[in-house]
Image (tube, rainbow, N blue to C red):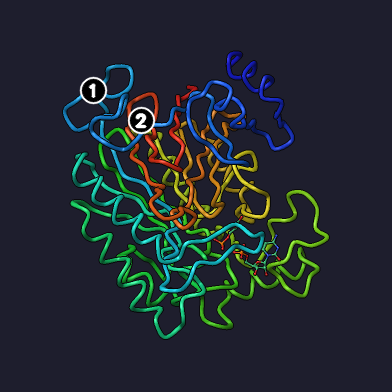
Amino acid sequence: MSFLFSLCLSSRHFNLDSKSFTITTLIGQRFGVGRFYMGHRANPLAFQGTCSSDAPMTSTNGSVGVQGKQPLFSFGVISDVQYADIPDGRSFLGVPRYYRHSIKVLQRAISNWNNHRKLKFAINLGDIADGFCPKDQSLTTVQQVVQEFEKFNGPVYHLIGNHCLYNLPREKLLPLLKIPTLKGHAYYDFSPTPEYRIVVLDGYDISAIGWPEGHPNTLEALELLQEKNPNADKNSPVGMCGLERRFLMFNGAVGREQLQWLDNVLQDASTHGQAVVVCCHLPLDPGAATQEALLWNYDEVMDVIHRYNCVKACLAGHDHKGGHSIDLHGVHHRVIEAALECPAGSDAFGCIDVYHDMLSLSGTDRMASTEMLFHS
Ligand SMILES: Nc1ccn([C@@H]2O[C@H](COP(=O)(O)O)[C@@H](O)[C@H]2O)c(=O)n1
Ligand SMILES: O=P(O)(O)OC[C@H](O)CO
């Protein structure tokens, strides 16, 4: 820990307000470990690898990975494909978005995962199609991206994001994404090996998007937005301060039932000695993402997570530039860089090697590689 602290200080970006610390890429640049872009927050232990069989420190099935050890299993990761057959555009803040190219990033990810690695599964951290997709093309666009994912030689686990819900209501979306669902919710868990549990949260459980009009969850979300966000445009954070800026319509919350379910799953995982990776489209730690991207009740979710010692890492999407932090309980938070923001020919996908004591993300191109050592 003291090593990490000294690295933090040398980066001149040290933030304890958010109950976590963040290490900027200045360190990466200083150590010459790869190409980063402004605003990215990366692990000082990160290296810029490629997700291929000949990359140093990555592993293929049957070969060794980091520290000469063989991973328990590996999985593919990608986020925010946000495909649409429309011309390139920009985010509200002016960041370029390459709507037609993003599906090519996905195709290269699948091809890489299939050719170079024997992966146990792949995970899509949400936003399969963009909200600017013409509504009469929403269904076919989501189907088209799902078909690309189906070319992966293994199971694909999808998360829902706000852009998925701009395109299709839950009742249509969840079956297409083959999300195991109870009463329209999109949270579930699975165990790829006896040692591990992957928990997928539904960050749009309480949300003003995706549920039918007048649904109790829509009403609860609208009430919260009314209370917390004074702007007429509930996607605008203008005039809102600090962490309050997360109360935007494009975010959402984990509801009471889901929180109780999470508690039960973590209790069960602890009983069985399993390590847990929590996945949610919306980031759960202010140290890893911009305030405007956070889950509304990230603090309540983290309170549940911190009751146990089993959660080792949380993976998220939504905040396209990506990020990494380690919170004060030693839980890693890795926000995955968006496929949508890759200019022609560039990529953002990765493979995660899973060990007893760490996760090792080998990112391709715009996705930074990150070693996530467990703290206890
Ligand atoms: N700082 C911001 C960010 C966003 N908005 C509003 O949200 C909409 C979606 O944002 P994108 O970044 O996905 O384009 C955008 O159209 C704005 O209405 C904002 O007001 N301030
Ligand atoms: O993917 P979007 O369009 O909802 O954008 C999300 C914001 O970038 C969050 O910071």
Q: For the point 46% across and 54% down, which residue is it?
A: 343
For ligand 2, the image quadrant comes to: bottom right
**Disc number at residue 273?**
2
Q: Earlier in the sequence, mark 1 or mark 2?
A: 1
**Which of the 4 image quarters holds residue 143?**
bottom left
| Three-letter amino acid code at the position of disc 1 | Val
Q: Is residue 256 above or below residue 366?
A: below
| Three-letter amino acid code at the position of disc 2 | Gly
Q: For the point 48% across and 71% down, which residue is it?
A: 87
Number of numbered discs = 2
Q: Residue furthest bottom?
A: 136
Q: Which residue is mark 1?
A: 64
Q: For the point 41% across and 64% down, which residue is it?
A: 128
342 or 14, which lies in front? 342
Badge 1, how many Cα within 10 Å: few under 14, some, many 20+? Answer: some
Please tell me whether mark 1 or mark 2 is closer to you in this view. Answer: 1
Q: Position of residue 171 (x, y in %)?
A: 40, 77
Give the quarter of the figure containing the N terminus.
Answer: top right
Q: Position of residue 366 (x, y in %)?
A: 46, 43
Mark 2, secondary structure of its residue = loop
346 or 128, which lies in front? 346
Q: CA distance from mark 1 to mark 2?
A: 25 Å
Q: Position of residue 103 (x, y in %)?
A: 35, 61
Badge 2, how many Cα within 10 Å: few under 14, some, many 20+? Answer: some
